[in-house]
Amino acid sequence: MHIGLIGLGKMGFNMRARLRNAGLEVTGFDRNPDVADVASVQELVAALPAPRVIWVMVPAGEITDGVIQELAGLASEGDLIIDGGNSRYTEDQKHGELLASKNIGFIDVGVSGGVWGLENGYGLMAGGDEEYISRAMPVFDALRPEGVREDSFVHVGGVGAGHYAKMVHNGIEYGLMQSYAEGYELLASKDIVKDLPGTFRAWQKGTVVRSWLLDLLVKALDEDPGLASIDDYVEDSGEGRWTVEEAIANAIPAPAITAALYARFRSREDNSPAMKMVSALRNQFGGHATRPAK
């Protein structure tokens, strides 16, 4: 199978490598010519056999919209476009309608795995028609971890459902990170606790709070035991906000996720050991930049 991949940043670059390792042929385009296989989106489209499959992996918002608009003018009837970025689900519905008017298929896919996906594989949440999901399944199987498909891939529903599921996934992630971070600050503040990193390390096996995020927390403390090099300023990618907005719109209480989002806003005002840990965790799993300590 030969696919196109637009966007070769932190995740797209590793995704291209994982697809190639699985035996798929990939032609990639990025604005950075040092990593691109072709010089333009037009060249990418021309290089692919019809009917084409093109995966878009660029920042959500105007950039994704611009790429979809460009592909709508370059792709042919029967082609399939996949948006694997973090677009808002309402944008998927708009893009799906645009492409459908030209008889071009569309799938939205929430992708989780961050900078570790090349080695570990990616969790995938897809939205779109069954015929398009089936057609793209070799791509999904190459990207996801080995093992039972249902443990790392789900066809959530129609267009927009994949990114809606990823939005909620990221909202949950906010709450989990905040809980670990607040526990870290509590332990760090108590003088009777003599081995803070060792305490978290001892939770990695056999406890009910064990998780990959906990493993990454331990890794962050191994690399910088006091998190002295990290500022407590924590960004939010937008999906936490969207999750809270959806909770409000549907009258569904989401106090943990909402509090975690507000804690990120608070991090931009004063010093907080807990928010240093949230920043460190975002760097560990997603390669998100931290700010140097002041």
Image (spheres, rainbow, N blue to C red):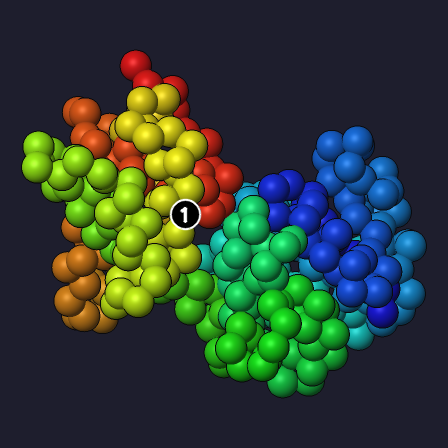
In this rendering, the count of numbered labels is: 1
Residue 232, position as x, y percentages in the image: 27, 29
In the rendered view, tell whether residue 133 sits above or below residue 187. below
Crowding at dot 1, Cα within 10 Å, few <14 / some 14-19 / many 20+, comes out as some
State which quarter of the image contains the N terminus.
bottom right
Residue found at x 8% / y 37%: 192
* Residue denoted by label 1: 216
**Residue toward you, 259 or 178:** 178
Quadrant of the rendering where the C terminus is positioned: top left
Vertical arrangement, residue 149 with respect to residue 67, above or below: below
Q: Quadrant of residue 188?
A: top left
Residue type of the residue flagged with mark 1? Leu
Q: Whole-percent x and y of residue 94?
A: 53, 63
* Image: 101 above or below 11: below
Query: Horizontal placement of 23 versus 11: left or right?
Result: right
Give percent across and percent down for residue 181.
24, 44
Q: What is the residue that sits farthest to the bottom in this orientation?
A: 130
Q: Is residue 271 left or right of residue 41?
A: left
- Please tell me which residue is depicted at 65% across the width and 79% down the height of the picture: 133
- Examine the image and state in which quarter residue 167 appears: bottom left
Q: Residue furthest top?
A: 294
Q: Secondary structure at mark 1?
A: helix
